[in-house]
Amino acid sequence: MTRDLLRAVAVAAATACAASAAWSIDLAEAYRLASERDATIRASRATSEAGRERLPQARASLLPSVSINSSRFKNDLDSKTPNPLVPGQEINNQDRYNSNNDTFVIRQPLFRKALTAQYRSAEAVAADANATLERDEQSLVVRVTGAYFEALLAEDQLELIGLQKAAYAGQVDAATKAFRAGAGTRTDIDDAQARYDLAVAQEVEARENVDLTRRQLQVLIDQPVTTLSKLNVSRMQLTPPAPATTQEWLSLAEAASPELMSARAQVEAARADVDKARSGHYPTLDAVAQVSRSTSENVTRLNTSYYQKQIGVQLTVPIFQGGYVNSQAREALALLERSESRLEELRRDLGVRIHKEFKGVTEGVLKVRALEQAVRSSEQVLVSTRRSFEAGARTRIDILNAEQQAGQARRDLSQARLTYMLSRVRLKALAGGLKVENIDEMNGWLQH
């Protein structure tokens, strides 16, 4: 009974391990894990949260400030005064007394141009923080999608090279047997062997690429990658971009691109900083209410208590600060020009990238369909070449060339599919229209 129990436990453990190894991660699960664990997006969220706090800080500076000041002192005063009765003689006095003061102050800014400019700057900084986070959230979708499908492509390339290597191995064996039987040549063996050896080398490189791409995905999801859900080609939708022109995509990007929104917010913050710098020339006006209570303020008022209430306004007029304010204004103007130039640079660069990815989608559809036909044609050529070889109209080298052509067409097709999918994701990200729903759509293209 003990042996049977141990055997049953061992079988259950093996089954559990096999089930765990067979568990595969899909694109939606990879994105969920990356959204929770990726260090870059977590840092971006923290940065955005910190940037949004600038707004309540600026708002607080416009509201009343309340403070209490309290002091307690022990005073020890030694004084010397001339003796009026005896010339040249001094009278020494020693006074020991305690003094205290309690002051309650309320201050409300009435006119401070710097504070209103600071508030507008804080609004722009908060908008920049939100736009930057949106950009990084969309970048995460692009990074996860790219890492996932690159890992799938590496697996496909390894599988195709393995199939080609097996075909070459079969040709080496067939050529060797034919040579021994006197129906072949040594050249056939050498040619097949050379192609087989090259396939072995390519397989080693492909295995390294599989490990590398899996590790890249692992960095994003912070979890070991064992098995990935494969692409189901029959579910994959090859559709041209909508809208159908680059100008319409540029219009979408102008309105919704998080990169442009961030750059515009930086320009607005720089403009507010210019006003803030120039406000150094303006006076400030505050309303002040104060209540104070003190005892023994000085040696002439020992044991005397005071209770004082004050309410009024305080005006400060700057006259001369050595050119400091003018220098600050010139600095702020230079930074504003830099922000405006960066905005224009980003707008132009965004147009180039949108054009590139738009072409990647439109031409990707055509390229994938063309390569699908090329794969079918190369496979048909391979079948026809084998039959012609059996009929004596073709050589074994012709078969090897046909197999190589078919394998290359399959690899090119896998690469074209990856390029199409990534261009599609990047195009939507650049225009600010990339959503989690796009992940769900492409996840539906996988085998489940």
Image (spheres, helix red, strand yellow):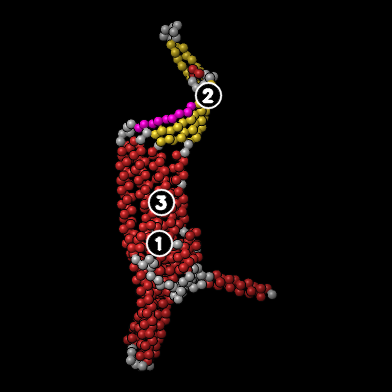
Residue 260, percent across and down? 37, 55
Q: Which residues are magenta?
A: 310-318
Q: Which mark is residue 429?
A: 1
Q: Is residue 341 left or right of residue 140?
A: left
Q: In percent of the image, x 46 and y 74: which residue is there?
A: 235
Q: CA distance from mark 2 to mark 3?
A: 50 Å
Q: Is residue 426 left or right of residue 71?
A: left
Q: Nearer the viewer, residue 423 or 282?
A: 282
Q: Residue furthest top?
A: 85
Residue 418, percent across and down? 40, 70
Residue 314 lies in the magenta stretch: yes
Q: CA distance from mark 1 to mark 3?
A: 17 Å
Mark sitting earlier along the chain (2/3): 3
User: What amino acid is labelled 2 in the image?
Assistant: Tyr
Q: Which mark is residue 420?
A: none
**Rendered image quadrant of residue 395:** bottom left
Q: Secondary structure at mark 1?
A: helix
Q: In percent of the image, x 37 and y 59: which residue is there?
A: 253
Which residue carries the number 2 mark? 307
Mark sitting earlier along the chain (1/3): 3
Task: Examine the residues drawn in magenta and state their main secondary structure.
Answer: strand
Q: Secondary structure at mark 2?
A: strand
User: What amino acid is labelled 3 in the image?
Assistant: Asp
Which residue carries the number 3 mark? 128
Q: Is residue 303 left or right of residue 239?
A: right
Kindly indicate whether the residue at mark 3 contacts the one at mark 1 (C-beta within 8 angstroms). no
Q: In percent of the image, x 35 and y 60: which residue is there?
A: 251
Using a 10 Å C-alpha cutoff, classify the residue at mark 1 as few (fewer than 14 neighbours), some (14 to 19) or many (20 or more).
many
Residue 222, percent across and down? 48, 61
Using a 10 Å C-alpha cutoff, classify the residue at mark 3 as few (fewer than 14 neighbours), some (14 to 19) or many (20 or more).
many
**Rendered image quadrant of residue 328:** top left
